[in-house]
Amino acid sequence: MSNEYYYQQPQPGQPQPGQPAPGGAVPYYVKKNPWYLRWWAITLGIVGVVGVCCFGALAFVLVGTELDSDSADNDEDSSVASDIDEEENDVEAGTEAEEESEADYFSSTFPVFAAFTESGSGDSVIDLPAGQGIVTASHTGSSNFILTTLDESNEMSDLLVNTIGNYEGTSAYGLDWLGMDSASLQITADGPWEVTIAPIADAPKLGDPEESQGDGVYQYSGGAANWALTHQGEGNFIVTYISDSLVGWDLLANEIGNYEGTVAVTSGPAVVTVNARGTWAIMSS
């Protein structure tokens, strides 16, 4: 780094440059400071440092504010999603609890046992689980097909099926309003048959509407309602409603041939049985 100098203007009485000074005096020079040590350079440097610091602080505040905003939005979104998940879980838990309650009723009110199937041809007798159950049967033949339940004394306790020719349907035993016990099932047939015995808890739920043909047994867990019943066919059309209400056993319909009408039912749970030769429907009205 080189030093800079500037010439000092001679004072009055001093010699001019290039001329000897009186008395042998020598002219002198004053040393000049570097630019970065001058007052204006130092002032500009201080201003620049302060500006950079202020800009950095402002940027930090803006970035922090943006991050805080994003974090708040994320927290809000997470909170909303959590609330939705909790509501869905509550709905699912309520539905599952309701379904479990319905299942508990049919499995706790009626006997539970392992379903089993018997098959054969012609007349036969098979043992039945005690209490109540459902009988799903099929028959191929041209003569009588009769299913009769017997008590322990082999006296008839209920007539489940009495038809001629081919048959396929489901009926229930042990639900008769007389409350008679059923110990065995007597089969009268002229052809091959198959019978499956299952607990009431295995019966399907009654749909709305429920449309089918022939005999059927269903679970009902809805509230009090008015049902529109229809039947197209020859022979009996019988619908019963078995519940824990004061009446307990209610005969909704008992007709022969075509039928159309509206009936009232109490709140479930209940067992609904249908005995029919033709097509039928049950629906809320």
Image (spheres, grey):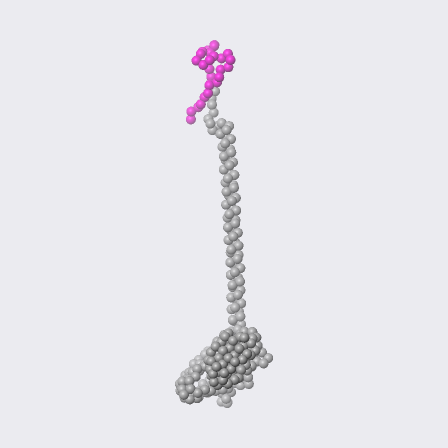
108 and 214: which is toward the camera: 214
Tell me if 144 is positioned left or right of 227 in this view. left
* Residue 253, image x, y percentages: 53, 82
What segment carries the magenta color? 1-29
Query: Does residue 195 appear anywhere in the picture?
Result: no
Q: Quadrant of residue 242?
A: bottom right
Q: Please give the name of the residue rendered at 51% of the width and 47% of the height, measured from the top-left corner.
A: 66
Looking at the figure, which quarter contains the N terminus? top left
Residue farthest toward the top in the current orientation of the protein: 23
Q: Please give the name of the residue rendered at 45% of the width and 11% of the height, measured from the top-left corner.
A: 20
Q: Please give the name of the residue rendered at 47% of the width and 80% of the height, measured from the top-left corner.
A: 279
Q: Main secondary structure of the magenta part?
A: loop
* Residue 170, image x, y percentages: 47, 81
Looking at the figure, which quarter contains the C terminus? bottom right
* Residue 87, image x, y percentages: 53, 62
Residue 2 colored in magenta in the image = yes
263 and 108: which is toward the camera: 263
Q: Is residue 152 above or below residue 43?
A: below
